[in-house]
Amino acid sequence: MVGASLLAQILAGPAGDAVVDAPLAAEDGHDDHTRPPLYDDLDALLQQWAPIYAGNAEYPRAVGFVPADSSNYSQGGINPEFIVVHTMQGYYAGSMSWFQNPAANVSAHFVMRASDGEVTQMVKLNDKAWHVGNYNGKCLGIEHEGWVDEPDEWYTWAAYTSSAMLTRWMADRHGIALDRDHIIGHVEVPGASHTDPGPGWNWDLYMALIHELVSEREIVGVVVDASAACTLTASGDTWVTRTLQTPGELGNNDKCLVSAGAQLEYHWAEVERIGRRRLTLAPGGPCDALGERAYVEVSAFNGFCAPEDMVVGAGTEVRLDGGASTFTDAAGAFSFADIAAGAHTVDVLEDAEFFAAAVPLQLEATPGARVIAVVEPVPVDDTDGDPTDTGDPTDPTADPTDPTSDPTADPTDPTGDPTNPTGDPTSDPTDPTGDPSGSTGDGDSSDAGGDPGDSGGGSNGGGGTDSAGALPNDYGGDAAYPEGCGCRSANSRELPGLLVLLLAATRRRRRRR
């Protein structure tokens, strides 16, 4: 209640004048934003009056419940269909104290401070506050600190964001549509003679903030494929911002200048709101200092990707705190409801296509939380039977299944002898007609069993050594090498060179869509 000394001054009036008599209103009172001048003397008010809290507020983020005087509202009788935004035309403390004055005949369900968005509840939600006359039975009301003709001073970012959370909470609780037909200003109430919140109230921003929020005790999210990150290109110099505020309203730590032609990589882009989209940025970009999420002007960038090309698709399992489980839908989305406030972890489970991921979060009492889970794809071997993939990128003829494969080998020659273009294992490479008598092997004493897949080089089929006497001792002799090659034993013969092992590289590939 109003402090006794201040109340006496108000009722007596300055210098002992007659009582300031605010006429009693009908049961459905109307807030005309008029009050005795002393209620706008903030210094005097703060010295002589302090709110008396009566238990907890219904709204979880309110600092408490400071009840309006019982003569300033009606018990029961409300069926909310609208939420009304008011401007007090006064101070936060002044409005609270006025609503507790039995002479006021006005009230609102909530009052809000401009500097930090502090909220105090003054009328229960199932009671009719007196703020919009004959429409009190259909309307919930929020009184915002400030004056209509000073919007830049009083309509602060803190007030917008706090009010948006309160409105979203009330709308969800009572099933009120999140549109401008049902979230209205005092000036829009039928028959109203008021102008608040006035033309300085940014309705586009306010509604964007309301729609961006998640309902109380809910976690909603989407699981996206890290390998499907999208790259934007700036069409001109532009700002990336931490919030939906304009760059001019932000300090240097809350915005990042991106030059024309610069690129920005992101994992996910939320829906467009007032010409902007909130991105989940890929690390290592020019705006890392802003954190994981930031806003961009849609018109300032080219190259936005289709959302369906960035998500994991249906069937990925997601668990909350190792317990409750759900699965992503075709849009990669998931949700959990009726979640208590506090610390939680959302786990995306590993499957054949994606590694596991864990997202810790702190869920407030209201609103809920939005989660963007980025998962890395599991690399898989290339099993698509690509005939052009031989394993050795420099050797188009190499056999990827044969680490000893000779790149000069004739693929039509099952013997794998690069000196024998005819495919006849007895053929003399210097004799195109071949040697019909040499039918027991290919005569190559270095072939100890043949290449993998070869039927064998020696006369015994498996052949560890060459057949004795297959060639005369002077076979192949010339002036430089008169003894020929036939006189040398298999054990003493030197290898013509080192065999090179060609390893087929396992290629990482992205999941096919």
Image (cartoon, rainbow, N blue to C red):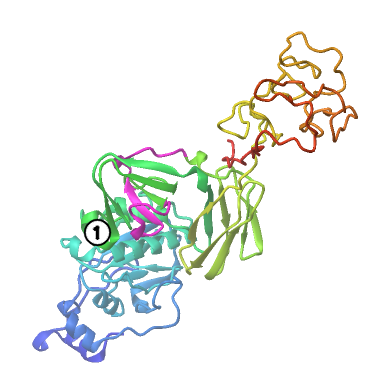
Is residue 234 rendered to the left or right of residue 81?
left
Residue in front for this viewpoint, 177 or 509? 509
Residues in magenta, as a range: 281-306
Q: Is residue 407 above or below residue 133?
A: above
Is residue 46 rendered to the left or right of residue 164?
left
Direction right: furthest residue: 460
Residue in front for this viewpoint, 214 or 259? 259
Residue in front for this viewpoint, 373 or 49? 373
Residue 68, position as x, y percentages in the image: 35, 77
The N terminus: image quadrant: bottom left
Q: Is residue 227 visible?
A: yes
Callout 1 secondary element: loop
Residue 269, position as x, y percentages in the image: 42, 47
In the picture of the structure, the residue carrying the numbered disc 1 is: 197
Taking the spot 21% from the left edge, 71% from the top edge, the residue there is 90
Residue in front for this viewpoint, 438 or 178? 438
Answer with the quarter of the image where residue 18 lies: bottom left
Is residue 429 rendered to the left or right of residue 131?
right
